[in-house]
Each structure stands twice: as C-alpha cells, then as structure tokens.
Amino acid sequence: MSTSVLELDKVQRIADAVVGMTVVKSGAETGVTIGIVTEVTAALITIEKPADASEDYVLSDLGDSGAVWLDAQTGQAVGSHFNGRDQSADPAAPL
C-alpha cells in the first residue's frame, strides 16, 4: 500500500474526526479540496465546504469516491470519501 496521496504529503496515521476539524482530500474529479467536519457519528462523518468558500466551490463530486480525507493540520487520515456530490445547488436532489 502506498501512503502518498495525490498532490498532498504522505498519510502519516489515522485520527478521529471531530466537529470543526478542517480536512483536505485529493479526489480524481475535483482535485484537492478543503472541508469542515460538521457531524460525526459511529457510522458517518459529514464534511461541508468552508463558510467562506465561494458559491461555485465544489467540495466533492462523483468520481472522488475512495479519496482519503486528512486532518489538514496533522496529515492524519480521518475517513474515506464516498457518495460525493455537492448538494449546495439543490439539497433535495437525490444522490
């Protein structure tokens, strides 16, 4: 297994996600993007775009599945990306 992630430093370890944590991923579709952890449950970590992001900022999209979300401060992995689709334009749209 390779610990290098596209355009990012090496993945160092695994960390627990916490609400408010800034995270970063390098996805095949959207490239390197930054998000904020907004909810953590036993089964799911919810990540949204930063409050100061532009309206057209795309956090994730189809094709980013499998990307690793890293703690932006430590480089530690906090989760694996799946079901990527930015719903900011239409939150009711089905995935």
Image (cartoon, grey):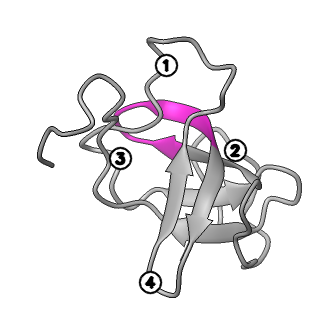
Q: Residue at x 66, y 27 (%)?
A: 51
Rendered location of residue 29, percent (x, y): 34, 34
Q: Which of 5 and 21 is in front in this view?
A: 21
x, y percent for residue 69: 59, 58
Secondary structure, mark 3, is: loop
Q: Mark 3 points at which residue?
A: 64
Residue 50, percent from left and from top:
65, 32
Closest to the observer, 32 or 7: 32
> Residue 85 bears which disc, if any?
none
* Three-letter code, disc 2: Leu
Judging by the rendered image, the residue that carries numbered circle 2 is: 8
Image: 52 above or below 31: above
Residue at the right extreme? 73
Looking at the picture, does residue 3 appear above or below residue 36?
Answer: below
Residue name at image x 61 percent, y 55 percent: 38
Which residue lies at the image location 65% right of the left edge and 70% below the top edge?
Answer: 78
Q: Name the residue under label 1.
A: 57
Residue 29 located within the stretch drawn in magenta: yes
Residue at the farthest left position: 94
Give the number of the disc on residue 43: 4
The residues bearing labels 4 and 2 have C-alpha atoms spaced at a distance of: 26 Å
Q: Earlier in the sequence, mark 3 or mark 1?
A: 1
Amino acid type of the residue tagged 1 in the rendering:
Tyr
Label 4 vs 1, first from the N-terminus: 4
Crowd rating for badge 1 (residues with CA inside 10 Å; few <14, some 14–19, many 20+): some
Residue 25 horizontal side relative to residue 28, left or right: right
Among numbered discs 2 and 1, the one appearing first in the sequence: 2
- Residue at left 74%, top 68%? 18
Query: Considering only order in the chain, which callout, 2 or 4, is on the residue closer to the N terminus?
Result: 2
Main SS, magenta region, reads strand
Q: Give the range drawn in magenta.
A: 26-35
